[in-house]
Amino acid sequence: MKNCYFDYLATTPTDARVIDAMMPYFTQTFGNSQSQTHSYGWEASRAILKAREKVSEMLNCKPQEIIFTSGATESNNWVVRSLLETWHAEESATKVHLITSAVEHSSVFEVFKWAETLSFVEVTFLPVNIYGQVDPQNLVNHLKPNTRLLSLMWVNNEIASINPIMQLTQICKEKQILFHTDATQALGKTLIDLQKTPVDLLSFSAHKLYGPKGIGGLFIRSEHPKVSLPPLLLGGSHERGLRSGTLNTPGIVGLGAACEISQKEFFADFQRAQGFRTEILKQLQIAFSELQVNGHPVESVPHGLSLTWKNGVVPHHFPYLAISRGSACHSTESGPSRVLTAIGHNEAMAQNTLRISVGRQTTEDEVAQLIESLKKSIRPARDPNTTDGVFTSS
Protein backbone atom coordinates (compact mmCIF):
# COMPACT_ATOMS: atom_id res chain seq x y z
CA MET A 1 0.00 0.00 0.00
CA LYS A 2 1.22 3.50 -0.77
CA ASN A 3 0.02 6.95 0.21
CA CYS A 4 -2.42 8.23 -2.41
CA TYR A 5 -3.46 11.86 -2.77
CA PHE A 6 -7.13 12.62 -3.45
CA ASP A 7 -7.37 16.18 -2.13
CA TYR A 8 -6.56 18.21 -5.23
CA LEU A 9 -9.32 20.72 -4.48
CA ALA A 10 -7.42 21.64 -1.30
CA THR A 11 -4.13 22.13 -3.11
CA THR A 12 -2.17 20.69 -6.00
CA PRO A 13 1.47 19.60 -6.20
CA THR A 14 3.58 22.13 -8.03
CA ASP A 15 4.17 20.88 -11.56
CA ALA A 16 7.85 20.02 -12.17
CA ARG A 17 7.81 22.24 -15.27
CA VAL A 18 6.62 25.15 -13.13
CA ILE A 19 9.46 24.59 -10.67
CA ASP A 20 11.97 24.52 -13.54
CA ALA A 21 10.63 27.87 -14.77
CA MET A 22 10.87 29.39 -11.29
CA MET A 23 14.34 28.20 -10.23
CA PRO A 24 16.51 30.76 -12.07
CA TYR A 25 14.64 33.61 -10.36
CA PHE A 26 15.76 32.40 -6.93
CA THR A 27 19.49 32.17 -7.57
CA GLN A 28 20.50 33.64 -10.93
CA THR A 29 18.01 36.22 -12.18
CA PHE A 30 17.17 37.36 -8.65
CA GLY A 31 16.90 41.09 -9.25
CA ASN A 32 14.18 43.41 -8.00
CA SER A 33 11.82 44.18 -10.88
CA GLN A 34 11.73 47.82 -9.76
CA SER A 35 15.51 48.19 -10.21
CA GLN A 36 15.56 49.79 -13.63
CA THR A 37 19.22 50.78 -13.83
CA HIS A 38 20.78 47.35 -14.47
CA SER A 39 20.16 44.03 -16.21
CA TYR A 40 19.11 42.11 -13.08
CA GLY A 41 16.12 44.37 -12.61
CA TRP A 42 15.33 44.45 -16.32
CA GLU A 43 15.29 40.67 -16.57
CA ALA A 44 12.99 40.35 -13.56
CA SER A 45 10.71 43.01 -15.00
CA ARG A 46 10.53 41.19 -18.35
CA ALA A 47 9.76 37.91 -16.62
CA ILE A 48 6.87 39.48 -14.71
CA LEU A 49 5.51 41.09 -17.87
CA LYS A 50 5.65 37.73 -19.66
CA ALA A 51 3.88 35.98 -16.76
CA ARG A 52 1.18 38.65 -16.70
CA GLU A 53 0.60 38.04 -20.40
CA LYS A 54 0.28 34.27 -19.83
CA VAL A 55 -2.31 34.77 -17.11
CA SER A 56 -4.27 37.23 -19.24
CA GLU A 57 -4.21 34.83 -22.20
CA MET A 58 -5.79 32.13 -20.06
CA LEU A 59 -8.53 34.48 -18.90
CA ASN A 60 -8.80 36.35 -22.24
CA CYS A 61 -8.35 39.78 -20.71
CA LYS A 62 -5.80 42.59 -20.94
CA PRO A 63 -2.45 42.05 -19.17
CA GLN A 64 -2.81 45.34 -17.29
CA GLU A 65 -6.09 44.08 -15.81
CA ILE A 66 -4.18 41.48 -13.75
CA ILE A 67 -2.81 42.53 -10.36
CA PHE A 68 -0.64 39.98 -8.55
CA THR A 69 -1.50 39.26 -4.91
CA SER A 70 -0.64 36.54 -2.40
CA GLY A 71 -3.73 34.59 -3.46
CA ALA A 72 -7.51 34.54 -3.56
CA THR A 73 -8.00 35.19 0.16
CA GLU A 74 -6.15 38.49 -0.12
CA SER A 75 -7.93 39.36 -3.35
CA ASN A 76 -11.36 38.59 -1.92
CA ASN A 77 -10.76 40.70 1.17
CA TRP A 78 -9.31 43.54 -0.89
CA VAL A 79 -12.39 43.73 -3.13
CA VAL A 80 -14.98 43.94 -0.37
CA ARG A 81 -13.07 46.09 2.10
CA SER A 82 -11.80 48.58 -0.45
CA LEU A 83 -15.14 49.04 -2.19
CA LEU A 84 -16.85 49.66 1.15
CA GLU A 85 -14.15 52.17 2.03
CA THR A 86 -14.70 54.00 -1.25
CA TRP A 87 -18.48 54.02 -1.08
CA HIS A 88 -18.55 55.19 2.52
CA ALA A 89 -16.14 58.02 1.73
CA GLU A 90 -18.16 59.12 -1.29
CA GLU A 91 -21.65 58.63 0.16
CA SER A 92 -21.28 58.56 3.93
CA ALA A 93 -25.01 59.02 4.53
CA THR A 94 -26.06 56.25 2.13
CA LYS A 95 -26.50 52.65 3.17
CA VAL A 96 -25.13 50.09 0.71
CA HIS A 97 -26.50 46.61 0.09
CA LEU A 98 -24.20 43.67 -0.68
CA ILE A 99 -25.16 40.15 -1.79
CA THR A 100 -23.29 36.88 -1.49
CA SER A 101 -24.35 33.28 -0.86
CA ALA A 102 -24.44 30.88 2.04
CA VAL A 103 -21.87 28.55 0.45
CA GLU A 104 -18.97 30.88 -0.27
CA HIS A 105 -15.37 30.16 0.64
CA SER A 106 -14.51 31.40 4.12
CA SER A 107 -12.44 34.28 2.75
CA VAL A 108 -15.61 35.67 1.16
CA PHE A 109 -18.17 34.55 3.72
CA GLU A 110 -16.24 35.92 6.71
CA VAL A 111 -15.50 39.30 5.14
CA PHE A 112 -19.22 39.68 4.37
CA LYS A 113 -20.03 38.74 7.97
CA TRP A 114 -17.62 41.47 9.03
CA ALA A 115 -19.24 43.94 6.61
CA GLU A 116 -22.60 43.12 8.16
CA THR A 117 -21.41 44.66 11.44
CA LEU A 118 -20.87 48.07 9.81
CA SER A 119 -23.65 50.58 10.34
CA PHE A 120 -23.80 51.65 6.69
CA VAL A 121 -23.92 48.13 5.23
CA GLU A 122 -26.65 45.54 4.86
CA VAL A 123 -25.85 42.06 3.58
CA THR A 124 -28.00 39.36 2.01
CA PHE A 125 -26.74 35.77 2.11
CA LEU A 126 -28.63 34.05 -0.70
CA PRO A 127 -29.76 30.47 -0.24
CA VAL A 128 -28.79 27.92 -2.88
CA ASN A 129 -30.61 25.08 -4.59
CA ILE A 130 -30.01 21.41 -3.79
CA TYR A 131 -26.97 21.51 -6.08
CA GLY A 132 -25.35 24.45 -4.28
CA GLN A 133 -26.09 26.95 -7.07
CA VAL A 134 -27.64 30.40 -6.88
CA ASP A 135 -30.89 30.72 -8.82
CA PRO A 136 -30.72 33.87 -11.02
CA GLN A 137 -34.40 34.60 -10.37
CA ASN A 138 -33.76 34.42 -6.63
CA LEU A 139 -31.01 36.98 -7.10
CA VAL A 140 -33.45 39.29 -8.90
CA ASN A 141 -35.93 38.86 -6.06
CA HIS A 142 -33.36 40.05 -3.52
CA LEU A 143 -32.07 43.09 -5.41
CA LYS A 144 -32.64 46.52 -3.87
CA PRO A 145 -32.19 50.05 -5.19
CA ASN A 146 -29.00 50.34 -3.11
CA THR A 147 -27.47 46.98 -4.12
CA ARG A 148 -23.88 47.70 -5.12
CA LEU A 149 -22.00 44.39 -5.15
CA LEU A 150 -22.64 40.70 -5.80
CA SER A 151 -19.91 38.19 -4.92
CA LEU A 152 -20.35 34.52 -5.85
CA MET A 153 -17.90 31.71 -6.47
CA TRP A 154 -17.59 30.37 -10.00
CA VAL A 155 -17.10 26.71 -8.97
CA ASN A 156 -18.00 25.40 -5.54
CA ASN A 157 -14.94 24.23 -3.64
CA GLU A 158 -16.71 21.33 -1.90
CA ILE A 159 -19.28 19.89 -4.31
CA ALA A 160 -17.84 21.15 -7.64
CA SER A 161 -21.07 22.71 -8.96
CA ILE A 162 -20.75 25.59 -11.41
CA ASN A 163 -22.82 28.70 -10.80
CA PRO A 164 -24.77 30.13 -13.80
CA ILE A 165 -22.19 32.89 -14.11
CA MET A 166 -23.32 34.28 -17.46
CA GLN A 167 -26.91 34.78 -16.31
CA LEU A 168 -25.80 36.25 -12.99
CA THR A 169 -23.38 38.70 -14.60
CA GLN A 170 -25.97 39.83 -17.14
CA ILE A 171 -28.40 40.66 -14.33
CA CYS A 172 -25.71 42.70 -12.60
CA LYS A 173 -24.72 44.48 -15.79
CA GLU A 174 -28.33 45.50 -16.48
CA LYS A 175 -28.68 46.85 -12.93
CA GLN A 176 -25.18 48.43 -12.85
CA ILE A 177 -24.14 46.26 -9.92
CA LEU A 178 -20.51 45.18 -9.62
CA PHE A 179 -20.00 41.43 -9.91
CA HIS A 180 -17.06 39.74 -8.18
CA THR A 181 -16.29 36.05 -8.40
CA ASP A 182 -13.86 33.84 -6.54
CA ALA A 183 -12.70 31.71 -9.47
CA THR A 184 -10.00 29.80 -7.61
CA GLN A 185 -11.61 26.41 -8.29
CA ALA A 186 -12.58 27.38 -11.84
CA LEU A 187 -9.15 28.06 -13.33
CA GLY A 188 -7.93 25.00 -15.18
CA LYS A 189 -11.21 23.15 -14.62
CA THR A 190 -13.63 25.15 -16.77
CA LEU A 191 -13.04 27.60 -19.61
CA ILE A 192 -13.05 31.28 -18.66
CA ASP A 193 -13.40 34.04 -21.24
CA LEU A 194 -13.64 37.49 -19.69
CA GLN A 195 -14.32 39.09 -23.06
CA LYS A 196 -17.59 37.14 -23.25
CA THR A 197 -18.47 36.97 -19.54
CA PRO A 198 -18.87 40.47 -18.05
CA VAL A 199 -17.32 39.72 -14.65
CA ASP A 200 -15.97 42.93 -13.09
CA LEU A 201 -13.59 41.43 -10.54
CA LEU A 202 -12.14 37.92 -10.37
CA SER A 203 -9.90 36.32 -7.71
CA PHE A 204 -7.63 33.30 -8.11
CA SER A 205 -4.72 31.37 -6.56
CA ALA A 206 -1.84 29.52 -8.21
CA HIS A 207 -1.70 26.55 -5.84
CA LYS A 208 -5.01 25.14 -7.12
CA LEU A 209 -3.50 25.14 -10.62
CA TYR A 210 -0.23 23.21 -10.06
CA GLY A 211 1.53 26.47 -9.28
CA PRO A 212 3.30 27.59 -6.10
CA LYS A 213 1.57 28.62 -2.89
CA GLY A 214 1.55 32.25 -1.80
CA ILE A 215 0.81 33.80 -5.19
CA GLY A 216 -2.40 34.61 -7.01
CA GLY A 217 -4.13 37.58 -8.46
CA LEU A 218 -7.10 39.83 -8.99
CA PHE A 219 -8.61 40.72 -12.34
CA ILE A 220 -9.93 44.30 -12.34
CA ARG A 221 -11.92 45.24 -15.44
CA SER A 222 -10.56 48.33 -17.13
CA GLU A 223 -13.53 49.27 -19.30
CA HIS A 224 -17.27 48.67 -19.72
CA PRO A 225 -17.20 49.43 -16.85
CA LYS A 226 -13.85 50.72 -15.64
CA VAL A 227 -13.54 49.43 -12.09
CA SER A 228 -11.43 51.40 -9.63
CA LEU A 229 -10.16 50.11 -6.30
CA PRO A 230 -8.15 52.08 -3.75
CA PRO A 231 -4.64 50.71 -3.12
CA LEU A 232 -4.37 47.68 -0.89
CA LEU A 233 -0.84 48.50 0.24
CA LEU A 234 0.93 51.85 0.11
CA GLY A 235 4.66 52.46 -0.18
CA GLY A 236 5.62 52.30 -3.84
CA SER A 237 4.49 52.14 -7.42
CA HIS A 238 4.30 48.36 -7.66
CA GLU A 239 1.29 46.89 -9.49
CA ARG A 240 0.15 50.24 -10.85
CA GLY A 241 0.39 51.65 -7.33
CA LEU A 242 -2.36 49.33 -6.09
CA ARG A 243 -0.26 46.83 -4.13
CA SER A 244 3.13 48.07 -3.00
CA GLY A 245 5.94 45.73 -2.03
CA THR A 246 8.75 43.98 -3.85
CA LEU A 247 7.17 41.55 -6.29
CA ASN A 248 7.48 37.81 -5.77
CA THR A 249 9.21 37.21 -9.09
CA PRO A 250 9.68 33.40 -8.75
CA GLY A 251 6.06 32.98 -7.64
CA ILE A 252 4.73 35.17 -10.44
CA VAL A 253 6.82 33.28 -13.00
CA GLY A 254 5.43 30.04 -11.55
CA LEU A 255 1.86 31.29 -11.83
CA GLY A 256 2.45 32.29 -15.44
CA ALA A 257 3.95 28.89 -16.25
CA ALA A 258 1.08 27.09 -14.51
CA CYS A 259 -1.45 29.06 -16.55
CA GLU A 260 0.40 28.37 -19.80
CA ILE A 261 0.57 24.63 -19.12
CA SER A 262 -3.04 24.47 -17.99
CA GLN A 263 -4.23 26.28 -21.10
CA LYS A 264 -2.34 23.85 -23.35
CA GLU A 265 -3.41 20.73 -21.47
CA PHE A 266 -6.90 21.77 -20.43
CA PHE A 267 -8.84 19.19 -22.43
CA ALA A 268 -6.44 16.36 -21.56
CA ASP A 269 -6.68 17.22 -17.85
CA PHE A 270 -10.47 17.53 -18.08
CA GLN A 271 -10.96 14.20 -19.85
CA ARG A 272 -8.60 12.44 -17.45
CA ALA A 273 -10.50 13.78 -14.43
CA GLN A 274 -13.82 12.87 -16.04
CA GLY A 275 -12.65 9.31 -16.66
CA PHE A 276 -11.51 8.84 -13.07
CA ARG A 277 -14.71 10.37 -11.69
CA THR A 278 -16.83 8.03 -13.81
CA GLU A 279 -14.89 4.96 -12.68
CA ILE A 280 -14.91 5.89 -9.00
CA LEU A 281 -18.62 6.60 -9.03
CA LYS A 282 -19.50 3.45 -10.98
CA GLN A 283 -17.59 1.16 -8.65
CA LEU A 284 -18.82 2.80 -5.45
CA GLN A 285 -22.45 2.76 -6.60
CA ILE A 286 -22.11 -0.98 -7.18
CA ALA A 287 -20.60 -1.48 -3.74
CA PHE A 288 -22.87 0.84 -1.75
CA SER A 289 -26.63 1.26 -1.99
CA GLU A 290 -28.18 4.71 -1.49
CA LEU A 291 -24.93 6.53 -2.24
CA GLN A 292 -25.79 10.20 -2.80
CA VAL A 293 -23.80 12.35 -5.19
CA ASN A 294 -23.72 15.99 -4.09
CA GLY A 295 -23.52 18.75 -6.66
CA HIS A 296 -25.06 19.22 -10.07
CA PRO A 297 -24.97 16.10 -12.30
CA VAL A 298 -24.04 18.13 -15.40
CA GLU A 299 -23.20 21.72 -14.44
CA SER A 300 -20.09 20.80 -12.45
CA VAL A 301 -16.38 20.12 -12.93
CA PRO A 302 -15.28 16.45 -12.86
CA HIS A 303 -12.19 17.08 -10.75
CA GLY A 304 -14.18 16.91 -7.50
CA LEU A 305 -16.69 14.33 -6.28
CA SER A 306 -18.72 14.81 -3.08
CA LEU A 307 -20.42 11.66 -1.82
CA THR A 308 -22.76 10.97 1.09
CA TRP A 309 -23.23 7.45 2.42
CA LYS A 310 -26.88 7.24 3.46
CA ASN A 311 -26.59 3.79 4.97
CA GLY A 312 -22.95 3.62 5.92
CA VAL A 313 -20.63 4.87 8.65
CA VAL A 314 -17.70 6.82 7.24
CA PRO A 315 -14.56 6.70 9.44
CA HIS A 316 -12.68 9.88 10.27
CA HIS A 317 -9.42 8.62 8.85
CA PHE A 318 -8.40 6.39 5.96
CA PRO A 319 -4.92 4.83 6.08
CA TYR A 320 -2.85 5.68 3.02
CA LEU A 321 -5.52 8.02 1.59
CA ALA A 322 -5.33 11.82 1.56
CA ILE A 323 -9.02 12.60 1.39
CA SER A 324 -11.23 15.28 2.95
CA ARG A 325 -14.73 15.93 4.21
CA GLY A 326 -14.93 19.49 2.88
CA SER A 327 -12.97 22.68 2.41
CA ALA A 328 -9.48 22.68 3.91
CA CYS A 329 -10.00 26.30 4.98
CA HIS A 330 -12.56 25.37 7.62
CA SER A 331 -11.74 21.71 8.27
CA THR A 332 -10.83 22.47 11.89
CA GLU A 333 -14.15 24.16 12.65
CA SER A 334 -16.74 22.30 14.69
CA GLY A 335 -20.13 21.49 13.21
CA PRO A 336 -21.13 20.45 9.71
CA SER A 337 -19.96 22.17 6.55
CA ARG A 338 -21.93 25.32 5.60
CA VAL A 339 -22.12 24.00 2.05
CA LEU A 340 -23.62 20.67 3.03
CA THR A 341 -26.04 22.35 5.44
CA ALA A 342 -27.13 24.76 2.70
CA ILE A 343 -28.00 21.91 0.32
CA GLY A 344 -30.10 20.15 2.96
CA HIS A 345 -27.74 17.84 4.84
CA ASN A 346 -28.16 17.37 8.58
CA GLU A 347 -25.15 16.83 10.83
CA ALA A 348 -25.22 13.04 10.51
CA MET A 349 -25.31 13.24 6.72
CA ALA A 350 -22.42 15.71 6.73
CA GLN A 351 -20.41 13.34 8.92
CA ASN A 352 -20.93 10.62 6.31
CA THR A 353 -19.80 12.79 3.40
CA LEU A 354 -16.41 12.68 1.67
CA ARG A 355 -14.85 14.96 -0.90
CA ILE A 356 -12.69 13.07 -3.37
CA SER A 357 -10.69 15.10 -5.86
CA VAL A 358 -8.36 13.94 -8.62
CA GLY A 359 -5.70 15.71 -10.60
CA ARG A 360 -2.90 15.63 -13.10
CA GLN A 361 -0.77 13.14 -11.13
CA THR A 362 -3.59 10.71 -10.26
CA THR A 363 -3.00 7.19 -11.60
CA GLU A 364 -5.26 4.25 -12.38
CA ASP A 365 -3.57 2.20 -9.64
CA GLU A 366 -4.30 4.94 -7.10
CA VAL A 367 -7.94 5.04 -8.13
CA ALA A 368 -8.16 1.28 -7.72
CA GLN A 369 -6.61 1.55 -4.25
CA LEU A 370 -9.05 4.32 -3.33
CA ILE A 371 -12.06 2.24 -4.34
CA GLU A 372 -10.88 -0.87 -2.48
CA SER A 373 -10.01 1.14 0.65
CA LEU A 374 -13.45 2.76 0.74
CA LYS A 375 -15.14 -0.61 0.24
CA LYS A 376 -13.23 -2.09 3.19
CA SER A 377 -13.42 0.92 5.53
CA ILE A 378 -17.04 2.14 5.27
CA ARG A 379 -19.36 0.00 7.42
CA PRO A 380 -23.12 -0.44 7.06
CA ALA A 381 -25.18 1.60 9.51
CA ARG A 382 -26.42 -0.38 12.50
CA ASP A 383 -29.81 1.28 12.69
CA PRO A 384 -30.89 4.01 10.27
CA ASN A 385 -33.45 5.32 12.78
CA THR A 386 -31.11 6.03 15.68
CA THR A 387 -28.90 9.02 16.45
CA ASP A 388 -26.02 7.20 18.17
CA GLY A 389 -23.37 8.59 15.87
CA VAL A 390 -24.66 6.68 12.86
CA PHE A 391 -26.48 8.19 9.93
CA THR A 392 -30.13 9.10 10.42
CA SER A 393 -32.33 10.25 7.60
CA SER A 394 -34.16 13.55 7.74
Image (cartoon, grey):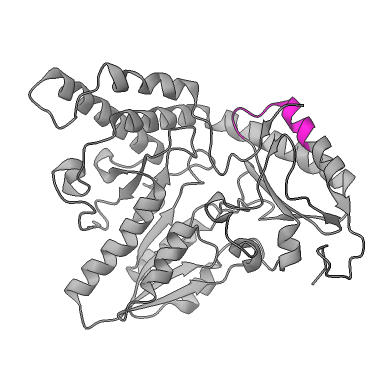
The residue under the point 65% across, 31% down is 272
Using the rendered image of the protein, determine whether residue 323 is visible from the camera's viewpoint. Answer: yes
Viewer-proximal residue among 84 and 250: 250
Q: Residue furthest top?
A: 28
> To which quarter of the image does residue 247 belong?
top left
**Magenta span:** 359-370
The residue under the point 75% across, 37% down is 319
Q: Locate residue 191 relative to residue 58 in the image: left or right.
A: right
Image location of residue 300, percent across then percent down:
61, 50
Query: Is residue 365 depicted above or below 155 in this figure?
Result: above
Q: Residue furthest left?
A: 37
The residue under the point 24% across, 51% down is 222
Q: Locate residue 243 relative to residue 15 in the image: left or right.
A: left
The residue under the point 14% across, 18% down is 39
Q: Quadrant of the C terminus?
A: bottom right
> To which quarter of the image does residue 312 belong?
bottom right
Query: Is residue 177 depicted above or below 199 in this figure?
Result: below
